[in-house]
Image (spheres, rainbow, N blue to C red):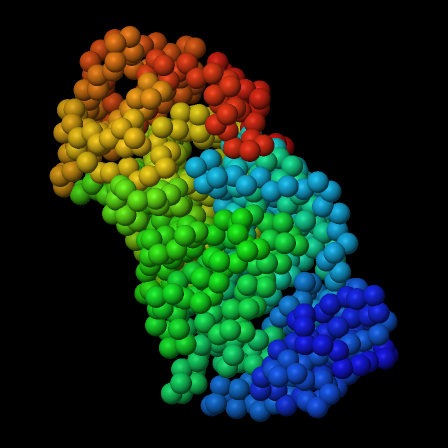
Amino acid sequence: MFKDRPGTSYPLGATVTRDGVNFAIYSKRADYMELLLFESDESPLPYATYSLSPEKNKTSTYWHIFLEGAKPNQVYAWRAYGPYEPWNGLYFDGDKVLIDPYSRGIVGWQHYSREAAIKEGDNCPASLRSVVLDCESYDWEDDRKPSIPYSRTVIYEMHVGGFTRHETSGVLPEQRGTFAALIEKLPYLKALGVTTLELMPVQAFDKSDAPHGMTNYWGYSPISFFAPYIGYSSVKTAAGALDEFRDMVKACHRMGMEVILDVVYNHTTENDHNGPTLCFKGLDNLTYYTIDDTNYSYKNFSGCGNTLRGEHPIVGKLIIDALRFWVADMHVDGFRFDLGSILSRDIFGNPQDRPPVLWAIESDSILASAKLILEAWDPAGLYQVGWFVTRANRFSEWNGPFRDDVRRFVKGDRNSVRALAHRISASGDIYGEAGGDRDPNRSINFVTCHDGFTMNDLVSYNHKHNLTNGEDNRDGADENFSWNCGVEGATRDSTVEALRLRQIKNLFTILMFAQGTPMILMGDEARRSTGGNNNPYCQDNELNWLDWSLSSRNEELIEFVGDLISLSQNFGLHRQERVLPVVATGRTLDNNLTTLTWHGVNLNEPDFGEDSHSLAFEIADKQTNKYLYAVFNAFWNPLEFTLPPLPDGEHWHKLIDTAKMHPEYIVAPKSSKALQTASIIVESRSSIILTNTNCFAITREEALARKAPNQKSARDRRITWTTMKRPSLPQ
């Protein structure tokens, strides 16, 4: 037993000092609290219990106690006593052991039982616990954040566990699926051209929050906003998980790569009244969750049983403090806010014009350098794509219409060309047309993400195949704008496979040459498949894990994607500082130097009709005398396009042609021959990118000057323009 004294209400959580540890926690409505101390995370019962009285250990709505001589790595938890009145929205239960919302470490997973936290009775032997950690002792050495501008950013959305869990990863068995294993694979991602890793949830989550017999694999089931999930650490201790995560961030920064976290502040794993009592519900349910004021049931805007009450000052402070921790103490570079629109809702669920927590995030000085990306919708029907970018200064958004409209066009749907033109030009119809100072790269463009088909499955399945999820194929989106190219699922038909590969290249080409910030889904460059399952959130198995042997079967595509990224960076005429307008004739931008012109098969005649399936555009930078011409032909027959005229002495050169086979689909400048004709045939369901002679003459100095900080040029990566050879996935 440690000698105790009242302690202080700040900082919240467990704070290590020279003399001991101060514990502070919020609960407005609890009658009294108990602090439990455990010998280890495996101890079934506490060896010491401290009772906190309102008279001595409470200041306003905060409970606190100081234990003299307590040290880091002390395992602890709380009990909160008060009224258990679900009909009034109160769920105090002294039988339930609660973790600290501010804990930097969560342990007890080996004996944890979700069921024990749901049913009546004491769950102490099967409970999760918090750990006292000293976050100040880590040696960051000379770590510096890359601070890559959006205009040079290429995001790679990935699952830490699934990236290296497969036996083909070449990682030691005890390290597979961990932050340490991710460090091993960073050279592959760097060579591919990725600048920014977007990690699916890595904060502690409940893997058992899934249908019976399944596992919550994705991690969108948070129980802590501070603690790294110990399952992603090769060292199975709270301190080990903290340090291994920081090792990973430091390694990324040394390679000039950023780390963005996917954070879930819209709900928790406690679900509704039938869910477990693990933390927030037992501490002060009415503070943390949005409750119906008529029957005190949980409002479920998240689709996951409850809705975190982001508009409440206590919850807002919790979110801000968590974000500050990840930026200041863990050195992450930004965040993607899952179902971010929920954070704009008020206590009644109505959207607010200036949501307090979101504007607090935007204006916070500690978060000033962080990338802030919102998923601007929620399952309850609140759809705000375009809303945050036009009203805030720093938020970017996942562009859902980009995904849908690009899919529809490449698939060959009618009435899809005008929408494609908008998506290519930074979605001016959503975010505002040309003019103003809005950075168009705050549109996060993607064709696939974790939620839905992989890119391989997008061209291999007409329908979802989710039976293995145990919900009779009811889960997952029914409309995917996919096309199987003639055969449902895997096939050995070489004609079908060739078309699928071409379609994937078309999707990648549009993604990389559209205005905005591109995001790639883990494994899409290697044709990773989930067997047509478009909602594999509960599949912690080979269905989701990246099979690294795909590199040998899909080396051509991996090389194509890497080369495409390099070309889009070095020939980035499409990366303007303002939104490109959707117009039929040239319009001057950027001090009368840059123009965008839409074309069809004839010059200046784009066909936006219902039956059109092709679009061409030209970007001319007259200051540097560089031109780019792109054609996307989703029609099932070849089409002939008239080429735009160039200044005297200049000729068009083919840079990309998705109809060509390896290695001719990307043409090296040294081997490219000038086109001598006034038109070009573009094959069915294919894309081409042309540049002019002067644009091919890019110098090494220009490439270096335009590269992202700490990002090596193609030549520095020993990938020459002559061979465009890129390493396959490491074995």
- Quarter-of-image position of residue 434: top left
From the top left corner, tell me how far across and down residue 643 is, in percent: 21, 19
Quadrant of residue 654 within the rendered picture: top left
> Which residue shows up at 59% across the image and 62% down it?
322
Q: Is residue 548 above or below residue 347?
A: above
Front residue of 232 and 669: 669
Does residue 382 appear left or right of residue 115 in this picture? left
Residue drawn at the location 48% of the way across and 27% of the way down? 706
Q: Residue at x 35, y 68 (%)?
A: 351
Q: Position of residue 543 (x, y in %)?
A: 51, 48
Residue 363 falls left or right of residue 574: right
Residue 496 spot, x, y in % from top left: 33, 32
Q: Quadrant of the N terminus?
A: bottom right
Horizontally, is 498 left or right of 144 in the view? left
Left or right, 606 with respect to 42, comes to left
Residue 674 x, y percent position in the rendering = 31, 10
Residue at 58% from the left image edge and 91% from the top image edge? 83
Residue 231's quadrant in the figure? Answer: bottom right
Pick whichever, 16 or 480, lies toward us. 16
Q: Is residue 341 above or below residue 723?
A: below
The reply to whether residue 213 is in sight is no
What number of labels is visible? Answer: 0
Q: Quadrant of the C terminus?
A: top right
Evaluate whether residue 91 shows in this view.
yes
